[in-house]
Image (tube, coloured by chain):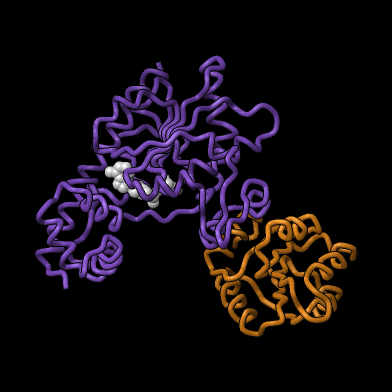
Amino acid sequence: MKTCLVVDDSRVIRKVARRILEDLGFEVAEASDGLEAMAWCSAVMPDMILLDWRMPGMDGLEFLRRLRAEPGGETPKVVFCSAETDLDRISEALDTGADEYIMKPFDGGIVAGKLDYLGLAA
Amino acid sequence: MIEPTDRAFLADLCLQRAGLQVDPEKAYLIDSRIAPVARREGFASPRDFVDALRADPDGRMSWALVEALSQSETDFFRDRRVFVHLVDEVLPALAAAHGGQPVRVWSAACGAGQEIYSLAMMLADAPGTPTATELYASDLSERALEKAQAGLYSQFEIQRGLPARTLVRHFEKQGDSFVLSPRIRQMIRWRRVNLLDDLSRLGQFDLILCRHLLPQLAPGAQALVLAQLQRSLAPGGRLVLGLRDPTGDLVAVDPAFGVYAAPSEAARSAA
Ligand SMILES: C[S@@+](CC[C@H](N)C(=O)[O-])C[C@H]1O[C@@H](n2cnc3c(N)ncnc32)[C@H](O)[C@@H]1O
């Protein structure tokens, strides 16, 4: 089973994302900020990371930079999932190493489409 | 309140105008689609809208009815591999057979433009010299065409099927919406076309896309539209249908990608 780490400081969003991803056949783990996510990834790299941008402590972009510098940190597909909809900021996320970008609010159809594009569909 | 006899009248009107198969038993569907149109068109109630249609079944309101009861939702790059196949295989083959003449492509029920724009963006982004194409798109719905021409999509619409890289490359933000660059929009020529009407004035096309419309049509209309589209195909042309669309007597060329040829044509090229 493919694994996905959901990183978001909102418990509600994590819950919504978990439901969608589990329906798509993923095993889901949660982290509430970049630091916690980093600890998770040093133990096991997931197949995919759904990543919020604005979080207290280590934000999504900073996490992504550090992840990509880790050994094995190139492997997970990273999909940003953020309320930021400015196209320059989206470009910045992609240039930093994100594979895809989802603007909040989102639904199952949007997530499924992105995973399909990334070749992660079950 | 819309009565059962009214629903039968509305379903029949959709069939006459557009070939649409509407089930008059689906009261909830019909009521929920009619109410917003009635409001938008300034009627005090759905009842008044139906009365206006009865008084003038050939008028402008009948098109508002058809728009309301046809299924127009779609994604960008719907069944993505189909687009890859068209750009990598089908279009270059058609171009080669043409000796460099531009390949004429027609999106024959283009909705709000996602399908033809997906193709246009892929052609614009293709490495090397993209296949020379002329892109045409049409729909029955004026509203769909206006939206398509404006190239303006909501945040929800834009995220359906469109990769983020493609979004930032070809779109600008406009308020809460996203607008496609003029460069891509200018690649398409638009026209309002009812596929039940005589299509001969449109000329012939090398590649016709008619995806996700046929399942909405009554059997007779399906056959009529398929026959008309076959006649609009240039020699050697290809018709692209949705992956679960009915295919009539067409000859499968690459059915995994929805690519078909006219039967007479297949006989000719096999000979
Ligand atoms: C689901 S959309 C298909 C969009 C696009 N082909 C795609 O696959 O992405 C179906 C479209 O068919 C149009 N349509 C319905 N009846 C039609 C007719 N008789 N002639 C032309 N277009 C029609 C509707 O207005 C609607 O926009």
- Residue A60 in the image, given as x and y percentages of width and height: 78, 71
User: Residue B6 sits in which quadrant?
Assistant: bottom left
Image quarter (top left, top right, bottom left or bottom right) of the C terminus of chain B:
top left
Q: Is residue B56 at least partly visible in the picture?
A: yes
Residue at point 66% right, 26% down?
Answer: B129
Chain colored orange: A
Residue sitting nearer the eye, B224 or B125: B125
Q: Quadrant of residue A75?
A: bottom right
Task: State the residue at coordinates (57%, 73%).
Answer: A20
Single out the residue that lies furthest toward the bottom: A11
Name the quarter where the N terminus of chain B is drawn: bottom left
Q: Is residue B268 above or below residue B43?
A: above
> Which residue sits at x=47%, y=36%?
B254
Specify the quadrant of the image occupied by residue B109: top left
Is residue A83 toward the left or the right of residue B150 in the image? right
Is residue B242 at all visible to an observer of this figure? no
Residue visible at 18% across and 56% down? B11
Q: Nearer the viewer, residue A43 or B33?
A: B33
For the colour purple, the matching chain is B
Q: Residue A89 location in percent, x, y?
A: 73, 60
Q: Residue B68 location in percent, x, y?
A: 29, 58
x%, y% of residue B116? Answer: 49, 41
